[in-house]
Image (tube, rainbow, N blue to C red):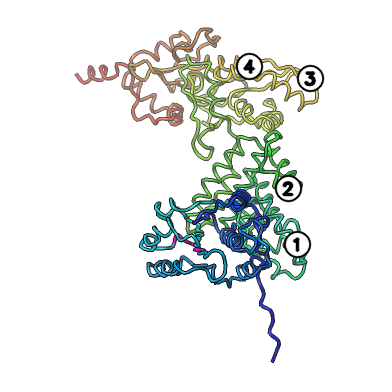
Amino acid sequence: MAESQTPHLVLARKWRPERFSELVGQEHVTRTLGEALKRGRIAHAFLFTGIRGVGKTTAARILARCLNCEKGPTAEPCGECAACVEIRAGSSLDVNEIDGATYRKIEDARAIIENLSYRPARDRFKIYIIDEAHQLTDSAFNALLKTLEEPPPHVKFILATTEPQKMPETILSRLQRYDFRRIPYLKILERLQDLAGREGVEVEESAIRLLAREAGGSMRDAERMLETAIATSAGKVTEAEVAASLGVASRTTVLKLADAILQKNAATALAHVRELASRGANLESLGRDLLETIRNLAVAKLPAGDSDSPLDDIPDHEVTELKRLAAGASARDIMRLFRLMADSQEQILKSPYPDLLLEMAVVRMASLAPVIDADELLRAIGSTPASGTPPASSGGGSGGRDAAKPEPAPSPQSSGARRLRVEGEVKADAPLRSESRDDDPRELPELRDFIRGRRAALAGFMEQGAGLILDGDILTVTARNDIYIRYLSDNKAVIAELASEHLGRAIRVELSANGAANSAAGRSTIPLASNGLTRELPSAAAAGASNPVVAEQAPKKPAPSRPIESIREFAPASPATEAARRAATPEERQAVLADPSVRRVFDTLDARLVELRMPNSAEASAKESK
């Protein structure tokens, strides 16, 4: 006959702790139980609670050995007497381990109660360890109520459960409860390194860290995954092998994904996700790892302190990489990315197609445009309440709830028709489109790009509301709208500093408000209703005789120094504007509506104009009909 081979024991059973001092990560429990054993204050019933694999059943067996050791009750069992040896092997007659999921009925509870009257066969106590105690039925719990409250002096109960909330309050009140915590990451890391040394297996540091991270605070899960990694590796256990066996992404891959998102490279970020999905990676785990990495990026931007940091558990080379990535992004943008990924992860966990949700979440994060805080925007426009401009919206779209894009607020000077500026003249018959300032070398596009890379909020305001002219060492910043004057004035020194750094010489900044005044002086208005609201029309010089309502272009006039009360204060007192304010005849109204330039102006407004109403037009129409 062939020799019988010794059965293999997995690491969790082979190296199970035999003393309280060997139980990792539960010092608050072992210390309390040890003191109780030393002082002889031993309860008759215990409840051990906590997540799976944190040592509840192991602690129950150690406590049973402490109670029945020949030298006990003691906090340090000898491990050599018959009681210690049999309890460790699971063959003791006086220590009964019961699976609550299997023996859960009232008949099983009654069998326990009937055996309580018998004395222990040899040891000091008869001990019942009920694992997964929450699985017992209500009738079984009711049968044990009196026994758990007043058991015989030679009986001890130890109940272990992962869900104490499912147990009746009447049972919980009769037990001395001990809550087992998740085992810290570093404790699991040290334990795995110790087990690898005992087994004589060479394991990469990064592989050990990946196993400890994926364990999620459960020592049994960590030992199980290490057992799998050792069994599947040909020699040295590497991070790539561990990641492939567990179906997770390595830390290097997650950092590359985060880098692509911060660099606004949506195509590369999407390629990383699809590659991991094709290799069978767990996408829920990938979403959690990406969320944790974004959290670490936010922590990396904080100043170093004396308190514990989440980065203390991360290797130095990974911390260096996190700080490098965080240096190129603002804390505000990282917070937006975290909020977006957290919302997406919640949907991924519930969705039947997590791959699509994760791919679109990554693309969306990589496509987010820089934004400014709503408070900063309100401070910038808060100094001009007389202009009647409502504050810009502080959220919307993919920008989050606490940010707003730096779009110019509608004002009397800028809410009308957009015109092309050609050699200082405003042409109303030019095609209606947005001004392209980046193509104009006078607008210094390279300087704008430099400022955008350093101060995104400032660049957003300058792109919308400031013209730039460089003459030698003097940079003239012209406000296109009076809303931006206060903000640009407050940031005058910052603009000078950035311009000096970009151009390599000292630059002096001068602020000019002529842009707002000139743009207002070249416009005429017509009243739309009896409430005094007015609508801008193209200049008469461009419209010519095709528009009988608008006459010649009025001469320019400087902007008034007092607060603007209405658009009419900007219109020059000329026959053209007086004609625009009088009651229009039906023929004039039709002529205005038929003008293509005017039609394009109305189409650009936020609210579509359904019908043009002029003062007293209804009365004029009534008189004609008569």
Q: Mark 1 points at which residue?
A: 203
Type of amino acid under label 3 = Ala
User: What distance separates the C-alpha of mark 3 from that of mark 2?
Assistant: 40 Å
Point out the tag, 1 or 2, that comes first from the N-terminus: 1
Q: Which of marks 3 and 4 is nearer the N terminus?
A: 4
Category of crowding for the residue at label 1, using alpha-carbon neighbours closer than 10 angstroms: few (below 14), some (14–19), many (at least 20): many
Q: Mark 2 or mark 3, which is nearer the start of the sequence?
A: 2
Q: Where is residue 305 in the image (x, y as percent from the top left)?
A: 70, 34
- Chain-order first, disc 3 or disc 1: 1
Quadrant of the rendered image containing residue 455: top right
Residue placed under numbered mark 3 in the picture: 506
The quarter of the picture where the C terminus appears is top left
For the record, the magenta segment spans 129-134
Residue situated in front as seen by the camera: 189 or 390: 189
Q: How far from the left and from the top, in percent, is residue 265?
A: 65, 46
Q: Is residue 410 depicted above or below 574 in this figure? A: below
Question: Camera-side residue: 519 or 227?
Answer: 227
Q: Mark 4, residues whose alpha carbon is within 10 Å: few (<14), some, or many (≥20)?
A: some
Eye-nearest disc, 3 or 1:
1
Residue annotated with mark 2:
318
Residue 212 showing in the rendered view = yes
Task: Report the side of 605 relative to 25 (left or right).
Answer: left
In the displayed structure, 555 sits above or below 252; it is above
- Real-space CA distance between mark 2 and mark 4, rounded to the nearest whole angstrom: 42 Å
Q: Which class describes the residues within 10 Å of circle 2: few (<14), some (14-19), or many (20+)?
A: some
